[in-house]
Image (spheres, rainbow, N blue to C red):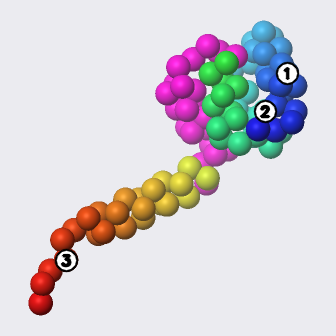
Amino acid sequence: MRSDFEDIMKECQEKVGQGASGADIVLYLHRQGATIVESMKVLKEVYKLPLGEAKALVTAHPVWADEIKSADILHEELENALRQEDEPTSKK
């Protein structure tokens, strides 16, 4: 976790108090260099959301689109590799 994470959390709480939306906070966090996981943690805390809702807000935001797409490709490749590994080998 970043050394300035608590400061960023406080700034986000102030922004929410001033009416910032979840999308505004995600964009702000992205610009501050926060990771997806850090962004989820902040949204979960400042909006008192379940983790699933925080994840959905963060991953649906356009600023994370390229990273989410890359992660989806990686997950798909991993699942395919694991499926192939689990398939019984055919005897010749």
> Would you name the residue on which mark 2 appears?
28
- Asked which secondary structure carries label 2, the reply is helix
Q: Is residue 15 visible?
A: no
The reply to whether dot 1 and dot 2 touch (C-beta < 8 Å) is yes
The reply to whether dot 3 and dot 2 touch (C-beta < 8 Å) is no
- Name above or below for residue 8 compared with residue 87: above
| Residue at 78 percent of width and 16 percent of height | 13
Is 26 left, or right, of 73 in this rendering? right
Q: In the current view of this chain or complex, which residue is farthest to the top?
A: 17
Magenta region, residue range: 46-66
Q: Nearer the viewer, mark 3 or mark 2?
A: 3
* Structural crowding at the residue carrying mark 1, measured as other residues with C-alpha within 10 Å and reported as few (<14), some (14–19) or many (≥20): some
* Structural crowding at the residue carrying mark 3, measured as other residues with C-alpha within 10 Å and reported as few (<14), some (14–19) or many (≥20): few
Instruction: Please name the amino acid that badge 1 sits on.
Output: Glu
The quarter of the picture where the N terminus appears is top right
Alpha carbons under labels 3 and 1: distance apart = 56 Å
Picture coordinates of residue 54, whole percent (x, y): 57, 27
Picture coordinates of residue 80, whole percent (x, y): 34, 64
* Numbered circle sitting on residue 89: 3
Nearer the N terminus, badge 3 or badge 1? 1
> Would you name the residue on which mark 1 appears?
11
Instruction: Please name the amino acid that badge 3 sits on.
Output: Thr
Q: Which of the 4 image quarters holds residue 21?
A: top right
Q: Nearer the viewer, mark 1 or mark 2?
A: 1
Q: Nearer the viewer, residue 3 or 17?
A: 3
